[in-house]
Image (cartoon, rainbow, N blue to C red):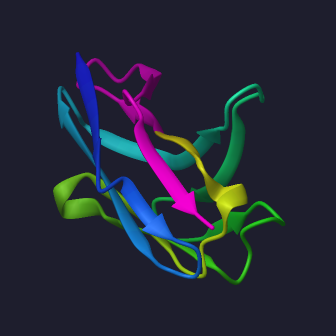
């Protein structure tokens, strides 16, 4: 079994910054893609950013130039640096990862989410 645990959410004023972390633990042979998603009240969960094992990245248009995804493969951890935050970034942020366990089976896992609130 694999667990993803997010941290770093909180309340920040518009224009401010937050750094989210997500640490994976458990039966991990390797982690392929890692993602950050977010879900605002009354809206569907949407993809924010993706990073490959070799650090290629992709971003939603709404966060390009403001958010940066990165990872530490040695620590099975993914980060999301969020700058120039606006109230529209308020949401629960979820970590998601494609993990290959020691049985060589690839499975997808979600974290429990961390709340980010941006005040005007």
Q: Residue at x 65, y 57 (%)?
A: 89
The N terminus: image quadrant: top left
Residue 36, percent from left and from top: 54, 48
Q: Is residue 54 visible?
A: no
Q: Is residue 41 left or right of residue 109?
A: right
Query: In this picture, is 66 found above or below 112?
Result: below
Give the main secondary structure of the magenta stretch.
strand
> Quadrant location of residue 106?
top left
Q: Which of 48 and 109 is in front in this view?
A: 48
Q: Residue at x 29, y 26 (%)?
A: 101
User: Is residue 92 rendered magenta in the image?
Assistant: no
Q: Which residue lies furthest to the front in this view?
A: 120
Q: How many marks?
A: 0
Q: Nearer the viewer, residue 85 or 96?
A: 85
Q: Is residue 3 visible?
A: yes
The C terminus: image quadrant: bottom right
Q: Nearer the viewer, residue 4 or 8?
A: 8
> Quadrant location of residue 115?
top left
Residue 54, percent from left and from top: 48, 69
User: Is residue 106 rendered magenta in the image?
Assistant: yes
Q: In this view, does 42 lie to the left or right of 50?
A: right
Q: Give the range drawn in magenta.
A: 95-120
């Amino acid at each position: 079994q694999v667990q993803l645990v997010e941290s770093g959410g909180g309340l920040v004023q518009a224009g401010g910054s937050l750094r989210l972390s997500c640490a994976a633990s458990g039966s991990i042979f390797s982690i392929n893609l890692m993602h950050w998603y977010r879900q605002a009240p009354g809206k569907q969960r949407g993809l924010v950013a993706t990073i490959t094992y070799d650090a290629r990245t992709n971003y939603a248009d709404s966060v390009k130039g403001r958010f940066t995804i990165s990872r530490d493969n040695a620590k099975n951890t993914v980060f999301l640096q969020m700058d120039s935050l606006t109230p529209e970034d308020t949401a629960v942020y979820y970590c998601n990862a494609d993990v290959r366990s020691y049985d060589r089976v690839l499975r997808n896992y979600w974290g429990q989410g961390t709340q980010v609130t941006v005040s005007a």
